[in-house]
Amino acid sequence: MGPAIYALSLIGVGIIVGRIKFLERVTKPAFRSLNLAILWGMLPIIVFVSIARYSRDQILSFGSAAILAFVSMGASFALAVVFSTLMHHDRKTTIAVTLNAAFMNVTYLGLPIVYAIMAGMGGPRPASAYLGPASLFAVVIAVPNLALGVVLASGAAKRRLSAGSVLENVLIFPATIALIAAMLFIGFDAHLPDVVSETFDHFLAKPFFALMLLFVGFQMPIVDPRKYKSKLATVGTIRFLVSPLVTYGLMMALGLTIGDIVSRPSLIMAIMPPAVFNIFLAHNFNLDRKLYGAIVFYLTIISLFIVLPLMIFLVF
C-alpha cells in the first residue's frame, strides 16, 4: 500500500495544482515545460541508462519482457474490439475503448511504480535493476501507442495521415531513439561508466519519477463517471483482469518464476491503468475528452488502491 499512497499523493498534488485557477498563468507553462523535460530528457535518460548498463547476455536474459508486453497488448486490443462490437459501440467509442484497454500508462506511471514497489520490497537486487526489463516493456507498449494511437484518433476525427508521417512520429519519439542508442551501445560492447549508473540511481531516479507522477495528476481531468459506467467496466475488465492473466499465463509458459527479474516489473506494468497519452490524443483530435478523462482518472485510482495492492498481496 505504501507505493500506492506515495504515487497517489504525488498525482493528487498534480490534480490540485491543476485546478487552482489563479495559478494557471504559472502552472500551465510550467507543466508544459515539465512535459518537454520528461519527454526529451528524463524518459530518454531512464530508458538509455536502464538498458545500456547491462551486457548483451543480460539483455537477452530479460528480453522476454518485450514478448510479454507485445502479447498482453495484442490480446487486450483484440478483446476490446470484440467487446465493442458486441456492445454495438459507434466508431469513436470503439476507438476510445480500444486505445484505453490496449495501451497502459507504462512511462509516466508504470516506470515510477516499478521503482517505488521494488525499492519498498527490498531484496538482493536494487530497485534500479528492475528498470531494464520495465523499460523494454514500456517501449514495446509506448511505440504502438504512439503510432496506432495517432492513426486511430485521426480516423475517428476523419483526418487523413500518410504512412510516412506516422513512421516519422515513431522514429523521432525520444524513448525510441534512446532505446536504439542503448542497443547500439550494447552491440559494440561499450561499458556504461559506473559514475553514470550511480548518479542515476542515487540522484536522478527519485526526482525524475516524482515529477512524472506530478505531471500525470496535472493532466488528469476529473469528470462524473456515471455516464461512462459501461465503458469503464469494459476497459477495467481488460486492463485489470485480462491483461495480467495473459501476462501471467505467458510467464508460466516461458518458464519464468515470480522471483525472476522480468516477472515482477512485467506484472506491474500489465495492470497499469490506461495511458495519459490517450488524453493528449483526445485533446489534439477533438474527441470526447470527458470519456477519455473518466477512463484514465477512475481506473488509475482503482489500479493504485485496489488492483495493485491485491496483486502484491496474492502474487508477490
Image (spheres, helix red, strand yellow):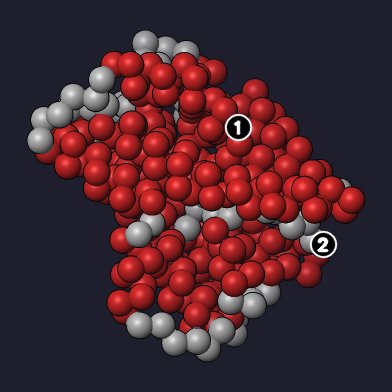
The answer to whether residue 51 is left or right of residue 22 is left
The answer to whether residue 245 is left or right of residue 192 is right
Residues tagged 2 and 1 counted as in contact (Cβ below 8 A): no
Q: Residue at x 29, y 45 (%)?
A: 179
Where does the image place residue 127, in percent across and percent down from the top left? 43, 21
Mark 1 packing: few (<14 Cα in 10 Å), some, or many (20+)?
some
Residue extending furthest top? 124
Where does the image place residue 171, in percent across and percent down from the top left? 31, 61
Where does the image place residue 290, in percent across and percent down from the top left? 73, 68
Q: Residue at x 32, y 45 (%)?
A: 178
Give the vertical position of 18 relative to 131 (above or below).
Answer: below
The answer to whether residue 143 is left or right of residue 304 is left
Query: Which amino acid lies under the numbered mark 1 shown in the image of this protein?
Result: Ala
Query: Which amino acid lies under the numbered mark 2 shown in the image of this protein?
Result: Asp
**Tag 1 residue:** 210
**Tag 2 residue:** 224
Dividing the picture into quadrants, the one containing residue 190 is top left
Res. 221 in view: yes
Give the vertical position of 268 relative to 29 (above or below).
Answer: above
Q: Residue at x 38, y 51 (%)?
A: 174
* Earlier-in-chain disc, 2 versus 1: 1
Front residue (pair 80, 28): 28
Q: Secondary structure at mark 1?
A: helix
